[in-house]
Amino acid sequence: MTSPGPDAADPTQPLAHEPDLKERADAALRELAGYRSTDAPTHGGRVLSYVYDSGLEVLDEVAASAARLVQSVNGLDPTVFGSVAAMERDLIEFGRTTFHGPDAVGSVTSGGTESCLLAVKAARDRAGAGPGQSSMVLPTTAHAAFLKAAELFGVEAIRVPVPTASTAVRANDIADAIRDDTILVVASAPNYPTGVLDPIAEIAEITRSRDLAFHVDACLGGFALAWWDGLPPWDFRVDGVTSLSADLHKYGYAPKGSSLLLHRDRDRHRAQFFSITDWPGYPIVNPTLLGSRSAAGLASAWAVSRTLGADGYAALTGRIRHAFDAVVTAIDGIDGLRVVGAPSGPVLAVRTDPEASEPVDTHLWGSAVSARGFALQAQPAFTQPDGTVLPATTHLTITPVTDSVVDELVEVLSLAAEEVRGAPSRLAPEALRELAGAFDSGAVTLDQALALPSAAAEEVLIAAGIDPHRHGGASDLDMPAIIAAVESLPRPVTARLLAEFLAAYCSP
């Protein structure tokens, strides 16, 4: 016989603290407000990554109201909760129109990562390949979510180097990388690191001639590029594009998390499903990776898209374009910095100009910009499979609200460059430089480093001055030094250390 736990209550009695629930709820919300005070500002155009602010308060209001209406709904079974099916149908229809796929079918997912994972799963299963029996070809600039998919689904990722100047993959290089076991080719519209659009039509000619699935990852900018003038076709207008993903919680301006994954035909879409009746419980049919799932993201995205409509999205994209052009012009006028490639919008990357008379370290510049109130995102240099190196960059995400602060931003970009001009690049923390030296000398092997237990990995971080138990936020981190560490150590090691950092940072 099992005895009740220490906090067991008599189920016939009301909750002892029930009269105090309102007071406890108010206290919880005050505590949460305190936590929120540590967050970067999600509105106002001060954070140029992660957040996609339309600048329209009405969208926040309608999204919150829609989420509240479906707060108790479970997206697991649309036959029980018909609102889930209705909203999903409407969003798929909106995607069909936006991305020129009149017969496209698909699903609303929890975000871009899930959309990318499902695109890979669908291609693998449609090809009838099991784990370890297939490959996919993608540029080095493709989102890391596809590498996660490769690991989860046993699909080898063949990463194709991109030209360091343009960062747009060459279609011929994609063609050369395709093997007999290749089941999918991936390209970006645009890529995240530099905002450059891959040559979708040229790649589609190759995949169509070889009867290969071709996924266009428009998770980042799809709902902006759809109204961005002057671009070559990149969506379902291109014969040969078999699937496309676009995030509703990025330039669709919905709260996290919702994304749209569309397939050109029904059979490819059905290949992403998991369904089973071979167990003692109820029949399970999951179109996405999740079983039970909140309908809040779906409802918020649906309400925002209904509120904006195509004309609203076009107007917001116009604001992005104005701000984007102003930022690019400003950076072009700063001696020592250079915009990477020819970004198609709405994001861009800035590198140090090695040919300038007085180069400006892009990461010191980014930190100086952040210190003046605009947070930018540092990206390390990357050595491609052919040995060529994509230079270190600083990433900027431009949103509609950026247009309201663009004059101040442009001034800050210039002032920050003058502030750090001539300053030497930041070195990695001394403890990590010593670790890098140990790798170079052979005193430490990659296997030994990856086998470090959690506590030892944490000691390395603390010795480097990166204490995961200090919860001051990103402003407490010397990002140029951390990025320098990423560049100096084997990438699997820095990935291991950063995983340890985040795990410890979020642990009690």
Image: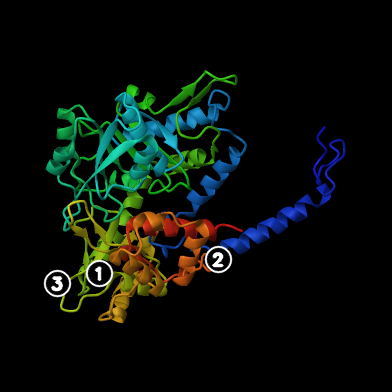
**Is residue 166 among what the camera can see?**
yes
Relative depth, front residue between 462 and 177:
462
Name the spot of residue 172 as percent of width and height, x first: 12, 42
Residue at image coords 28%, 32%: 134
The residue where tag 1 is placed is 330
Residue at image coords 20%, 68%: 332
- At mark 2, the secondary structure is loop
Which of discs 1 and 2 lies nearer the camera? The answer is: 2
Sequence-first tag of 3 and 1: 1
Which numbered dot is residue 355? 3
The residue where tag 2 is placed is 469
Residue at image coords 46%, 43%: 304
Compared across the picture, whether 461 is left or right of 326 comes to right
Farthest residue toward the left?
A: 172
Q: CA distance from mark 3 to mark 1?
A: 18 Å
Assess disc 1: are there few (<14), some (14-19) or many (≥20) residues with their C-alpha within 10 Å of its C-alpha.
some
Assess disc 3: are there few (<14), some (14-19) or many (≥20) residues with their C-alpha within 10 Å of its C-alpha.
few
Farthest residue toward the front?
A: 443
- At mark 3, the secondary structure is loop
* Amino acid marked by disc 2: His
Name the spot of residue 448 as percent of width and height, x first: 39, 57
Which of discs 3 and 2 lies nearer the camera? The answer is: 2
Compared across the picture, whether 16 is left or right of 235 comes to right
Q: CA distance from mark 3 to mark 2?
A: 42 Å
Relative depth, front residue between 11 and 467:
467
Relative depth, front residue between 388 and 441:
441
The answer to which image quadrant residue 320 occupies is bottom left
